[in-house]
């Protein structure tokens, strides 16, 4: 877990270093490529019995006209799980309203996962994490150099894990291993602030 947190911190520090770099402009068609970031907070809303929890995300990358690409990481809470997703993000401003824009965004990557302590009652517990993706629709309001965004969409998270019973008196017989693959689907709503 400490190695994962160190990796996330290194990524964020590198991203802030890139923010200090000047914008670059292509001399051929005057297309401006600029640094872009966003910090988002929101909710993961599940159907009854699955719970609704929080999501915190940061995405850093570049923007060229209406297209944005970047890398992101964050923290997400589910009923029995906490995940640290690492993903690629692609967004496109499909409609402009003066300096503001409606956008569509797709995120895809992998989440490292751990189960909450109150449920960790199994010996040799092994979590592989799993793939994650999201499709998001939003509206971005530009104010000077900052922007505020409101977005919502669909979030998918898969987690694969295995465990053995806490108590096993099988003698020479190996403890049975149970492997589970769990898919969690949520409606996601977020508010964000960033440089675009």
Image: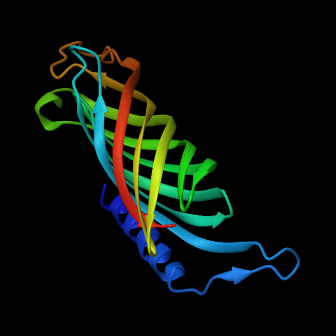
Residue 97: % across, % down? 56, 53
Residue 85: % across, % down? 42, 47
List the single residue furthest toward the left. 118
Residue 165: % across, % down? 22, 19
Count of numbered badges drawn on the protein: 0
Closest to the observer, 97 or 167: 97
Closest to the observer, 106 or 112: 106
Closest to the observer, 14 or 25: 25
Which quadrant does the N terminus fall into?
Answer: bottom left
| Apparent side of residue 76 relative to residue 116 in the rendered image (left or right) | right
| Apparent side of residue 158 relative to residue 75 in the rendered image (left or right) | right
Residue 100: % across, % down? 51, 57
Figure check: 189 above or below 30: above
Q: Quadrant of residue 28?
A: bottom right
Figure check: 152 above or below 64: above
Residue at x-position 56% and y-position 59%: 98
Residue at x-position 43% and y-position 42%: 111
| Apparent side of residue 135 relative to residue 31 in the rendered image (left or right) | left
Residue at x-position 46% and y-position 68%: 11
The colour mode here is rainbow
Figure check: 177 above or below 151: above
List the single residue furthest toward the front. 98
Figure check: 158 above or below 129: above
Residue at x-position 60% and y-position 87%: 22
List the single residue furthest toward the right. 28
């Amino acid at each position: 877990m400490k190695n994962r947190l160190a990796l996330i911190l290194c990524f964020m520090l590198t991203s802030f270093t890139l923010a200090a770099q000047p914008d670059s402009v292509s001399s051929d068609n005057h297309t401006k490529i600029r640094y872009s970031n966003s910090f988002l907070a929101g909710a993961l809303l599940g159907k009854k019995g699955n719970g609704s929890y929080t999501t915190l995300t940061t995405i850093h990358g570049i923007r060229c006209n209406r297209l944005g690409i970047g890398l992101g990481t964050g923290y997400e809470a589910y009923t029995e799980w906490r995940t640290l997703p690492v993903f690629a993000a692609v967004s496109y401003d499909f409609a402009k309203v003066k300096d503001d824009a409606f956008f569509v965004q797709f995120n895809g990557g992998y989440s490292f996962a751990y189960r909450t302590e109150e449920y960790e009652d199994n010996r040799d517990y092994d979590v592989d994490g799993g793939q994650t993706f999201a499709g998001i629709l939003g509206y971005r309001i530009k104010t000077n150099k900052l922007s505020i965004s409101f977005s919502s969409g669909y979030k998918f998270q898969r987690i694969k894990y295995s465990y053995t019973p806490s108590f096993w008196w099988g003698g020479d017989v190996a403890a049975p291993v149970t492997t589970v693959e769990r898919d969690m689907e949520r409606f996601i709503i977020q508010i964000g602030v960033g440089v675009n």
